Image (cartoon, grey):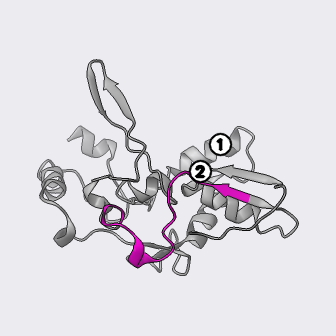
């Protein structure tokens, strides 16, 4: 499975074919003078029809052969699963396949701390090149021709617990945000908190 080439040595070795590992390997390999190896412990499903149901239907979080089986302790005395993907695509392939960006001010803070190229306006162009957003293709925050298709689950595809959470949030007065990657979408304001 996957593209393999026999090379005696590599200039760059990327460990883990998750979201960042794949992106880093792809970008570094754009330099034809570099030999790049991307190493992943889990399988790589080249064709969509070969992808197992626990990855295709990942919104149900039923992991089988694609999870490391880690456990964490979020509070003293309570242990829970800590899903980490063991497959090309990494944890993004098993964690409900959510495409959720950081907050613009976080990226700007990284740039302000001496990391040029990491400001919001810098990374936004990369996000847009990466995605093909089916729901918001003609907005300033989304791309429409990238290699990764982005869409939101409609109500008809949600499980009962997901819809109940959204219904409860609405009943409590939290504003609905159709696009969590739009920094102008009002998720929660101090005005709403004061009411």
Q: Give the mark nearer the N terminus: 2 vs 1.
A: 2
The answer to whether residue 14 is left or right of residue 89 is right
Q: Residue at x 72, y 58 (%)?
A: 37
Residue 51 drawn in magenta: yes
Q: How many marks?
A: 2
Tell me the crowding category of disc 1: few under 14, some 14 to 19, or many 20 or more residues within 10 angstroms, Cα based. some
Q: Is residue 136 visible?
A: no
Q: Which residues are magenta?
A: 37-55
Q: Is residue 24 above or below residue 114?
A: below
Q: Is residue 173 above or below residue 158?
A: above
- Distance, label 2 to label 1, CA atoms, is 24 Å
The answer to whether residue 40 is left or right of residue 193 is right
Quarter of the image containing the C terminus? top left
Q: Which residue is mark 2?
A: 16
**Quadrant of the rendered structure where residue 72 is?**
top left
Q: Which secondary structure, mark 1?
A: helix
Residue 155 drawn at (x, y percent): 19, 69
Q: Is residue 140 visible?
A: yes
Residue 43 drawn in magenta: yes
Residue 8 drawn at (x, y percent): 84, 58
Residue 97, label in figure: none
The answer to whether residue 4 is left or right of residue 174 is right
Q: Which secondary structure, mark 2?
A: loop
Q: Which residue is mark 1?
A: 110
Tell me the crowding category of disc 2: few under 14, some 14 to 19, or many 20 or more residues within 10 angstroms, Cα based. many
Residue 126 drawn at (x, y percent): 63, 65
**Nearer the observer, 182 or 133:** 133
């Amino acid at each position: 499975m996957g593209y393999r080439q026999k090379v005696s040595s590599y200039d760059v070795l990327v460990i883990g074919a998750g979201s960042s590992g794949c992106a880093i390997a792809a970008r570094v390999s754009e330099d034809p003078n570099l030999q790049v190896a991307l190493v992943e412990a889990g399988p790589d499903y080249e064709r969509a029809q070969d992808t197992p149901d626990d990855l295709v239907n990942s919104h149900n979080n039923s992991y089988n052969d694609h999870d490391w089986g880690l456990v964490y302790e979020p509070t003293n005395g309570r242990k829970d699963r800590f899903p980490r993907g063991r497959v090309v695509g990494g944890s993004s392939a098993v964690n409900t396949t959510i495409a959720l960006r950081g907050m613009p001010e976080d990226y700007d803070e990284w740039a302000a701390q001496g990391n040029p190229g990491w400001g919001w306006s810098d990374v936004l162009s990369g996000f847009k090149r990466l995605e093909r957003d089916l729901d918001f293709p003609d907005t300033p925050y989304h791309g429409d021709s990238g290699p990764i298709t982005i869409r939101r689950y409609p109500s008809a595809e949600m499980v009962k617990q997901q819809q109940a959470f959204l219904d409860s949030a609405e009943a409590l007065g939290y504003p609905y945000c159709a696009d969590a990657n739009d920094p102008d979408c009002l998720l929660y304001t101090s005005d709403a908190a004061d009411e």
